[in-house]
Amino acid sequence: MPSKDNNNITFIDLFAGIGGMRIAFEAVGCECVLTCEIDQNALITYKKNYQPSHSHLYAHDICKLESTDIPKHNILIAGFPCQPYSIAGLRKGLKDERGEVFLEIIRILKDKQPDAFLLENVKGIVNHDDGETFRYMQEQLRKAGYEIKHDVLNSMTHANVPQNRERVFIVGLRNPKAYFNFQFPKKIELTKTIHDCLDGNTVKPNHIYNDRYDCFTTIKKAMTKSDTLYQWRRQYVRENKSNACPTLTANMGSGGHNVPLVKDPIYGIRKLTPKETANFQGFPASFKLPSELPDSKLYHQFGNSVTVPLIKRIAKNIVDALK
């Protein structure tokens, strides 16, 4: 069992993306000892923000990651691929090759037996295949030696981040007392607005909509408010009436119509910049965006990431339970 000194609590970061979960766990005093991420572009961003360390290892493919190469750790964290379970996707679940990586997580949990784990995915996983997929996952996690709790939390209601983003979180603990002590964070008041995340200083000409877009006339007519965000949905404009950012998605990188739009007092109609999507995910202002990567890759990375302040609240509760 870890001591009360959080510096003794270590974790491995699987399906790490650009390191959103790592930021959160390090913020509560934990140390990352291994990162696993297969996307080379994501690793460019990740490594730009984390300097190499002799005590930290990198791996690329979890399916090729031998248990003997994984250092001892207290917590396993993994935002494993969501596409097989997404409402917007084909929902193939574990039949999709990306769904099979869940079994690699089970393998590592059985072999290394960390004190706890945190898994994150889209909320659609709970009801996929009439709930059979999620029941199977829970069964496998329990067989690996863990008592588990799960909840669907929204960045807008649980992290004071103005993004309407619902995700399911699964926490497992080996120690019964730690399991009893752990609770998911409660709702908190949303005091921030979209204007706390907007940054006109990062706007470039390619972010601005004008007559060169066939849809511009329709968009301009529909976007009448400056305190909300909109989306162009191929044939119509969707207003996010919660006065928050709609869910940022990985496919922002594959189609400009999916990037939320704002009516800017200076630039007029424009889409969010990559830096602004980082802000809507609660990344710290110091987080670096590689200049060598195109916007499409950065949009994909932040849409595929996590809301950092929400993960930080969960991480703190896990650490407190382990104490």
Image (cartoon, rainbow, N blue to C red):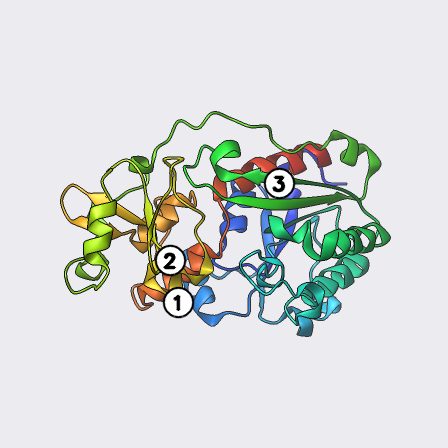
| x then y, percent, for residue 110 | 81, 58
Which of the numbered marks, if any, corresponds to residue 73? none
| x then y, percent, for residue 72 | 72, 56
Residue at position x 77%, y 58% in the image: 112
Q: Amino acid at mark 2?
A: Asn
Q: Is residue 293 above or below residue 8?
A: below
Q: Of helix, strand and loop, which one carries label 2?
A: helix
When asked about the image quadrant of residue 94, the answer is: bottom right
When asked about the image quadrant of residue 30, the answer is: top right
Residue at mark 1: 254
Q: Amino acid at mark 1?
A: Ser
Camera-nearest label, 2 or 3: 2
Q: Is residue 263 left or right of residue 13?
A: left
Callout 2–callout 1 Cβ contact below 8 Å: yes
Callout 2–callout 3 Cβ contact below 8 Å: no
Q: CA distance from mark 3 to mark 1?
A: 27 Å
**Mark 2 nearby-residue class (10 Å; few <14, some 14–19, many ≥20):** many
Q: CA distance from mark 2 to mark 3?
A: 24 Å
One can see residue 5 in this view: yes
Q: Amino acid at mark 3?
A: Val
In this figure, what is the number of numbered marks?
3
| x then y, percent, for residue 32 | 58, 53
Pick whichever of labels 3 and 1 is earlier in the sequence: 3
Name of the residue lying farthest toward the bottom = 64
Residue at position x 54%, y 49% in the image: 21
Residue at mark 2: 258
Q: Is residue 246 above or below residue 48?
A: above
Residue at position x 72%, y 65% in the image: 104
